[in-house]
Image (tube, coloured by chain):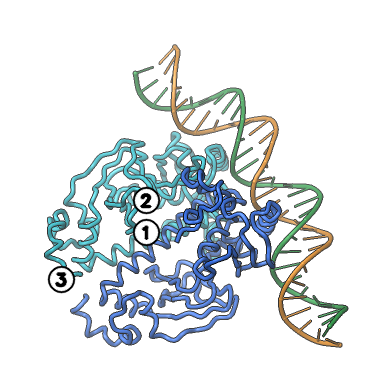
Chain colours: A blue, B cyan, C orange, D green
Amino acid sequence: MLSVAYSAEAKHVTAARLAPQPERLEEVFCAVPRESFEAGEGVFWEGDQADHVFKVSEGVLRVFKIIADGRRVITGFLYAGDLVGLSLKDRYLYSAEAVTPVRLRRLARKPFAEALEKWPDLRPQFFARVCDEMATAQDQMVLLSRKSAEERVATFLMLLARRLHGCHPIGRRIHLPMSRLDMADYLGLTIETVSRTITKLVARGVISPEGRHDFAICKPGKLLALCGDGDSYEDTIDREPKMRQAIWPH
Amino acid sequence: MLSVAYSAEAKHVTAARLAPQPERLEEVFCAVPRESFEAGEGVFWEGDQADHVFKVSEGVLRVFKIIADGRRVITGFLYAGDLVGLSLKDRYLYSAEAVTPVRLRRLARKPFAEALEKWPDLRPQFFARVCDEMATAQDQMVLLSRKSAEERVATFLMLLARRLHGCHPIGRRIHLPMSRLDMADYLGLTIETVSRTITKLVARGVISPEGRHDFAICKPGKLLALCGDGDSYEDTIDREPKMRQAIWPH
DNA sequence: CGGCGTATTGACTGAACTCAATTCAGGTGG
DNA sequence: CCACCTGAATTGAGTTCAGTCAATACGCCG
């Protein structure tokens, strides 16, 4: 299929061939123009024909499923650099909406798949993405299955803190672009419980609010301990301050 | 990497090359001998070097994670034909133990990966497996995030009913090889809640017990409705009996 | 038949949910 | 510039579903 059918399929390669021999998976998306979505706008819907894969280049996306009587489960938030719709099923498993204004690149599945065929070096990167997604899903199952409200919120804050660490190298600040309802639907809680839990963390001096969507982490060690995934290893060290390499990997 | 490095890597291919040009991914495992595990025995542990992938040929496996203070989350049960350890991370994301006596084939990751390189036709099958795993994980997130105890148990029973449907083509019987504790740790509940919920389903005549680990589904439509993922489509039909194609797909 | 682990049942508790009232912040228009 | 307005967030009061703790029943195996 690799070489035999190549000439027959060449007409579809359009986008992908414009960027010959990409080294990184993201580069496959460079050839297509960026699309813009306003906050709240939908990108695709669960059950749609899964014709495209996407790369977020700006903004934040939420992916979610809706079940009976309108209950919504947000299975993830996606940031710049993340790929969406990787699952090679013929229909999307979830819906995707913009949380903030979003810019992304949309690539038809066929040229994407062909790029993977054509440049074997990209395949491990693709695997790695899918495996990361799987690992994240598993962690989320743990959170939803066994963690208390406080542990869930703490885990979420740590997640965002880690993610933003690249952008804001110094200063333990977190920005929450999404509404409390989004957080609640991600954490398997209600708005009220999320709100109350944050209030409690603030009261205890673990975090301190800087507007409703920004917080400073005053006690990173404490916050980490509250996540509840303490391996015995981490548990023993986080009482002491200045173990920053351990607390803030990467 | 495909052809250039082939001769250099040929010495590792041992197992895979004994079954030349397999058509199905499972056949890659045929060359290695089967190993046996007793009920309760561990196959690998979270954090171990992920050197192997496995194919279950008999019995049932549970995969799980342990978090702080010993809380356990079972992320899945694996049956004959299922592959385990597919994630191409360098360490296992979870532990695996035999629920029942298990026989499985263990294949080193390298020949497995090489088989995928060598026979491109296997790759879509591999993708499909990983994507199925992803889809299952997402459904589980929905279950854990938003479903009531009753919905969780009903969903679990339907899952097993569907899975066993291949083996027991007629008669709506479910076999639960795992303990109530396993079920509880899979469904994010306690033993007592699982037990009470089952009792309630029995009292309402939805299912009827045939020993502690076997049940007959008396009202499949009702059970499906109780799962709580009712699309409006399924919701409208399941009041009526004899819509078996819809209720029991495949 | 007795013993032990698993499952069930019961009584009570509590964490998170629901419903409702208030406060806050950001945007608009006078 | 400020006052108002609106949706979002917070806070409060009461409820509920599932968890906890404890007692009992079942069933399997020696």
Q: Secondary structure at mark 1?
A: loop
The chain letter under disc 3 is B
Q: Residue B206, labelled with which disc?
A: none
Disc 3 designates what residue? B4
Amino acid type, mark 1? His
In the image, what residue occupies the spot 16% across and 53% down?
Answer: B15
Left or right: A222 in relation to A47: right
Q: Tell me if label 1 and label 3 are in contact, CB under 8 Å.
A: no
Q: Residues within 10 Å of mark 1 (few under 14, many from 20)?
A: few
In the image, what residue occupies the spot 51% across and 62% down?
Answer: A162
| Dot in front, 2 or 3 | 3
Measured from the top left, where is residue A120 in percent x and y?
A: 26, 72
- Earlier in the chain: of badge 1 and badge 2, it is 2
- Earlier in the chain: of badge 1 and badge 3, it is 3
Q: Is residue A11 visible?
A: yes
Amino acid type, mark 3? Val
Q: Quadrant of the N terminus of chain B?
A: bottom left
| Dot in front, 1 or 3 | 3
In the image, what residue occupies the spot 32% across and 84% down?
Answer: A19
Q: Tell me, yes or no, whether dots 2 and 3 are on the same chain.
A: yes
CA gap between label 2 and label 3 equals 46 Å
Q: Residue B165, labelled with which disc?
A: 2
Q: Residues within 10 Å of mark 2 (few under 14, many from 20)?
A: some
